[in-house]
Image (tube, helix red, strand yellow):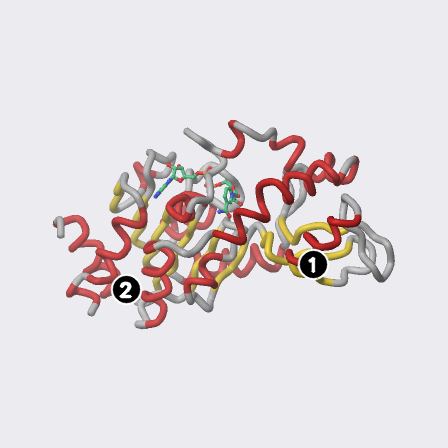
């Protein structure tokens, strides 16, 4: 174990209130592509068509075809990786209060994390835009065998995923909860985020401004690297298990 990992593990052990902030990079090793950078989803799919509320309202079939071809098969096969499992373990041993995530894939919960704030919603829940009835992704997929976009059998409204599309505001209550975590924590572990999407990236920034130790684990440099106490440019699945398994945290 390198000395920086030992120092991070020691600071985590001594922390009173540790929070993790995660982005698409933590799920990359599970096989879910990030949005930006090499191999990123946006290099193949135009976000103005697949992820914007304006376009969804204009023509929801674009999103739903993307769901059928890309999103659904991916969600059915992906599993949490060692980085998700390490954060779940940190919570179980009482060293992590909450995961605040930008991700919409549900992998933190599947790994066993119970306190998860999903800033951008979840693709695992589908609801009707008219009557708000909730459906599973399997139900939406089945409805799509009949028609695309999928339609609510109760009221004939169009279905949508419970995600925050580009052009939509974040849920103010969820954002408030995340800001509270940033204010309360004395240790913030930012993992797999380019830290360029706001207001999400405000969470590590606010935590640091409030005096927390800021640790950034990300493959590529981020705009907050200069502010951080520790920066590791490595894959999360290699680094996080070492932090949890460190004798400092046993
Ligand atoms: P991003 O695509 O902007 O950045 C991802 C970052 O992860 C990059 O800086 C990259 O260097 C890093 N990275 C890639 N592989 C890594 C690894 N194995 N270990 C550590 N770091 C790694 O993603 P973002 O900052 O989360 O913001 C983009 C938005 O994309 C978010 O709002 C999120 O809702 C959405 N998104 C979610 C998913 C998902 O749910 N899995 C996937 C793609 C995008």
Q: Position of residue 54 (x, y in %)?
A: 73, 36
Q: Is residue 64 left or right of residue 241?
A: right
Earlier in the chain: of badge 1 and badge 2, it is: 2
Q: Which residue is mark 1?
A: 139
For disc 2, the marked residue is 15
Relative horizontal placement of residue 202, taking residue 82 as reference (left or right): right
The quadrant of the rendering that contains the C terminus is: bottom left
Q: Is residue 25 above or below residue 8?
A: above
Q: Residue at x 12, y 50 (%)?
A: 3
Residue 11, given in percent of the width and then of the height, sits at: 22, 59
Q: CA distance from mark 1 to mark 2?
A: 43 Å
The answer to whether 54 appears left or right of 77 in the picture is: right
Residue 68: x and y in percent read 64, 44
- Estimate how packed mark 1 is, as few (under 14), some (14 to 19) or many (20 or more) residues with alpha carbons within 10 Å: few
Seen as rendered, the residue at the extreme right is 155
Q: Secondary structure at mark 2?
A: loop
Answer above or below: position of 69 versus 99: above
In the rendered image, the vertical position of residue 25 relative to residue 211, given as above or below: above
Against 68, is 133 above or below?
below
């Amino acid at each position: 174990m390198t000395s920086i990992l030992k120092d991070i593990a020691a600071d985590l052990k001594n922390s009173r209130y540790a929070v993790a902030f995660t982005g698409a990079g933590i799920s990359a090793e599970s096989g879910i592509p990030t949005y930006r950078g090499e191999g990123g989803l946006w290099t193949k799919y135009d976000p103005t068509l697949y992820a914007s509320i304006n376009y969804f309202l204009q023509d929801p079939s674009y999103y739903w075809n993307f769901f059928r071809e890309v999103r659904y098969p991916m969600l059915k096969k992906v599993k949490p990786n060692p980085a998700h499992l390490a954060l779940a373990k940190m919570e179980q041993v009482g060293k992590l209060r909450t995961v605040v995530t930008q991700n919409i894939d549900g992998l933190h919960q599947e790994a066993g994390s119970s306190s998860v704030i999903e800033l951008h919603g979840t693709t695992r829940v589908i609801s009707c835009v008219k009557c708000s009835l909730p459906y599973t992704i399997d139900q939406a997929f089945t409805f799509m065998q009949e028609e695309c976009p999928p339609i609510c059998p109760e009221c004939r409204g169009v279905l949508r995923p419970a995600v925050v599309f580009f052009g939509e505001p974040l849920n103010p209550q969820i954002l408030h909860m995340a800001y509270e975590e940033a204010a309360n924590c004395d240790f913030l572990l930012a993992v797999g985020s380019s830290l360029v999407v706001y207001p999400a990236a405000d969470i590590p920034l606010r935590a640091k401004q409030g005096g927390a130790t800021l640790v950034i684990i990300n493959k590529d440099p981020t705009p907050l690297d200069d502010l951080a106490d520790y920066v590791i440019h490595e894959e999360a699945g290699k680094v996080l298990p070492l932090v949890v398994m460190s004798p400092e945290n046993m």
